[in-house]
Image (tube, rainbow, N blue to C red):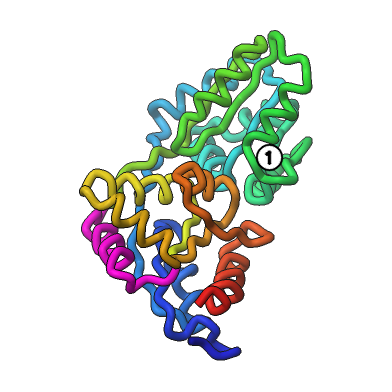
Amino acid sequence: MGDTDEPLRGYTVGVTAERKAEELASLLERRGAGVLRAPAMHTIPLPADGELAESTARVLAAEVDYVVVTTGMGFRGWMEAADASGDGAALRARLSRAALLARGAKARGAVRGAGLRETWSAPSEETREVLDYLLARDLRGRRVVVQVHGEPMPWFRQRLAEVGAEVLAVTVYRWTDPLEPEKLDELVDEVIAGRVHALTFTSAPAARNLLGRAERTGRLDRLRAALHDGVLLGCVGPVTAAPLREAGLSCVLPERARNTSLVRTLAERLPSAS
């Protein structure tokens, strides 16, 4: 359908992101794609004087041994909240004496942006690899801070507790249903009708919520059938892809977890899949 300058011309791509949706849509449109935007989830920052403040106080109460940074956005949000409450300098000092473990490039960038330095970064950018790194060490009596982002990661925290670690969870954001669920319903209808050639996902909750919304509205079977029938699913990374793969759906991933790389992958794969 497309030409070399606009390889996605004639294709319609759904964008399920909330954050940076405009950037992703613009990148796709430059490649010639028609874009349907329908955020599949909504991010709510926790108030700095509530649960997040309590978590920060627990971190500051004693030295910590390991800090798991799962997302760049979440870590930056934590630092911003601490700065706003006057705890920023103390928190950075506390974290600087711990081993900082970054799940991937974005988390690593946020750590460095806060004036800190990571001890280790997971090459695969997968949470499981971070867990394996920790479990290879003696964690008995160690304080491990886990910065979670929307999802509580109970399996991760439980496994650490089982080997004797004291686990401190710091939740910066929560995810809820999208503010305009009717837009997501329209996107699902367009996919079922065969008028969408690809869907993009930049977060696991968006992928999970799209499937969940379809199930709650009685359209999951039809959506799954449509997705299996030639709709290309593009995910920015393996964590994002996990809910889709768990549902038995295949997807493509770029070599780097970046929107530009995701669009480049779609531009390469979509025409050849037609």
Q: Residue at x 53, y 37 (%)?
A: 78
Q: Nearer the viewer, residue 83 or 201?
A: 201
- Residue underneath mark 1: 102
At label 1, the amino acid type is Ala
Q: Is 61 placed left or right of 38 in the picture?
A: right
Q: From what the image shows, is residue 13 above or below residue 200?
A: below
Residue 221 coordinates in the image, percent (x, y): 30, 51
Main SS class of the magenta portion in the image: helix
Q: SS class of the residue under badge 1? A: strand
Q: From what the image shows, is residue 86 above or below residue 206?
A: above
Residue 192 coordinates in the image, percent (x, y): 30, 64
- Residue 93 showing in the rendered view: no
Q: Is 205 placed left or right of 5 in the picture?
A: left
Q: Nearer the viewer, residue 218 or 140?
A: 218
Q: Residue at x 40, y 75 (%)?
A: 12
- Residue 259 showing in the rendered view: yes
Task: Give the extent of the magenta segment.
Answer: 179-198
Q: Nearer the viewer, residue 245 or 90?
A: 245
Residue 6 coordinates in the image, percent (x, y): 53, 87
Q: Is 80 placed left or right of 215 in the picture?
A: right
Residue 52 coordinates in the image, percent (x, y): 45, 29
Q: Is residue 186 magenta?
A: yes
Q: Using the rendered view, name the quadrant where residue 266 is placed.
A: bottom right
